[in-house]
Image (cartoon, helix red, strand yellow):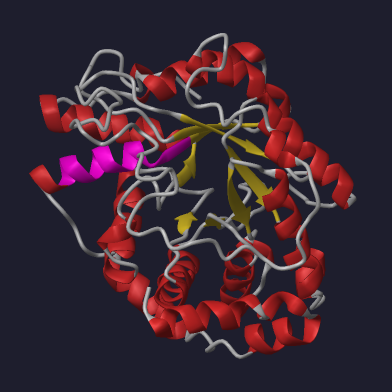
């Protein structure tokens, strides 16, 4: 870490001390050029990749999927089937990589943990959740520089990256390390007392989740109560213990790109390991311009602090063409360091099937129908 970076990190630690300093910092961020952002993403969206590069991009996109079911009608059987698909998305093709994670409601976490890791919840479990208690620090958790390593000390969510499929054994077809994410904090609204949201988080971690997707209080944020939002993220981060925290901004409700930038920085200052666009439960979910703003934020945050934070667009990403547009955007905005499941994820369900269909077409020349793969 350079002396300049160390000084900047020290300065940022002071930002969360009061509402006034937080407001001054967030409103001092450069404004977003709306027309420029939309034109840039439209231009990048016209790029196409072919053959070998496309095959690589499809496999990378599969490894970045957080395979998700968040419905009131979810059952243990559905969750077990989803976990099986996460481990082997295409049972007919042993070279197909595993996805990054399964994402479920807290009540389904023990079922998913058993399905992914075995009856004892296996190697992915973050421990007994003992880190979820204790006092909540006033200041946010800027974290230590990653030294180029991922949030799991270099371990890819799909394995150690040694093999073509990123599998745990380094061999194509061996099931990789699939993480278990759980939404929490009164998802999707976030409208519950803080203690209820913290209990929700601790319950998910105790059940075996090693990633938590929380939602911010958009009402507080839009009312300008930044300190309240900041302190709540700090508290949830503490409740996560060893689990990693994705902070959902619900960008479709934030109204402006400037608010998206402010919310991104607020979440990172408070300790987020990932920033996520959406719950998928509101009409406007992930968009390329919003993701561009968030990618610029994580890039600039690392430049200032030395800490790398991931990005997860979620909702509305359904086709391979969509996924490739996002991968191009990542490469051209944040850079190739983010082209890894440790740093970029897709929150999706239907996307995986389209990726699998396109993958099969590239390898066989035959386009399989949508009923060839299981429906999620």
Q: Can residue 294 be spotted in the picture? A: yes
Residue 97 image-quadrant placement: top left
Residue 314 x %, y % = 52, 49
Residue at the front extreme, as displayed: 3
Image: magenta residue range: 54-66
Q: Horizontally, is 271 left or right of 373 in the view?
A: right
Q: Is residue 180 above or below residue 169?
A: below
Asked if residue 124 lies left or right of residue 45, the reply is right
Q: Closest to the observer: 66 or 194?
A: 194
List x then y, in percent, for residue 358: 24, 34
Instruction: Kindly identify the residue that appears in the image at 33 percent across and 36 percent down.
Output: 62
- Horizontal side of 144 relative to 279 (left or right) equals left
358 vs 12: above or below: above
Residue 301 coordinates in the image, percent (x, y): 47, 73
Asked if one can make out residue 81 in the rendered structure from this viewpoint, the answer is no
Does the magenta segment cover residue 65?
yes
């Amino acid at each position: 870490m350079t002396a300049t970076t160390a000084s900047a990190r020290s300065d940022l630690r002071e930002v969360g001390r009061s509402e006034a300093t937080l407001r001054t910092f967030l409103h001092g961020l450069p404004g977003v050029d709306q027309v420029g952002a939309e034109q840039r993403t439209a231009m990048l969206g016209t790029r196409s990749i072919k053959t070998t590069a496309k095959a690589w991009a499809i496999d990378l996109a599969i490894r970045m999927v957080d395979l998700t079911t968040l419905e009131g009608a979810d059952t243990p059987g559905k969750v077990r089937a989803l976990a099986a698909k996460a481990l082997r998305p295409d049972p007919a093709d042993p070279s197909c990589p595993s996805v990054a994670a399964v994402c479920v409601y807290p009540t389904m976490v023990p079922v998913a943990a058993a399905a992914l890791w075995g009856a004892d919840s296996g190697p992915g479990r973050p421990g007994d959740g003992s880190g979820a208690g204790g006092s909540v620090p006033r200041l946010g958790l800027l974290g230590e520089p990653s030294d180029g390593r991922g949030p799991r000390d270099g371990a890819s969510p799909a394995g150690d990256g040694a093999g073509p499929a990123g599998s745990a054994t380094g061999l194509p077809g061996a099931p990789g390390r699939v993480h278990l994410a759980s939404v929490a904090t009164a998802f999707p609204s976030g409208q519950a007392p803080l203690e209820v949201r913290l209990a929700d988080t601790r319950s998910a971690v105790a059940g075996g989740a090693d990633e938590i997707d929380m939602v911010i209080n958009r009402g507080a944020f839009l009312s300008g109560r930044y300190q309240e939002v900041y302190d709540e993220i700090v508290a949830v981060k503490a409740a996560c213990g060893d689990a990693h925290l994705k902070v959902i901004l619900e960008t479709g409700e934030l109204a402006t790109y400037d608010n998206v930038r402010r919310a991104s920085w607020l979440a990172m200052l408070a300790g987020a390991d990932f920033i996520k666009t959406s719950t998928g439960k509101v009409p406007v979910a992930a968009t390329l311009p919003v993701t561009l703003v968030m990618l610029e934020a994580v890039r600039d945050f690392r430049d200032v602090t030395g800490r790398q934070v991931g990005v997860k667009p979620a909702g509305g990403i359904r086709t391979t063409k969509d996924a490739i547009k996002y991968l191009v955007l990542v490469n051209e905005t944040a850079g190739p360091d983010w082209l890894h499941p440790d740093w970029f994820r897709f929150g999706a369900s239907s996307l995986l099937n389209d990726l699998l269909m396109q993958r099969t077409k590239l390898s066989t020349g035959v386009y399989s129908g949508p009923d060839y793969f299981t429906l999620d």
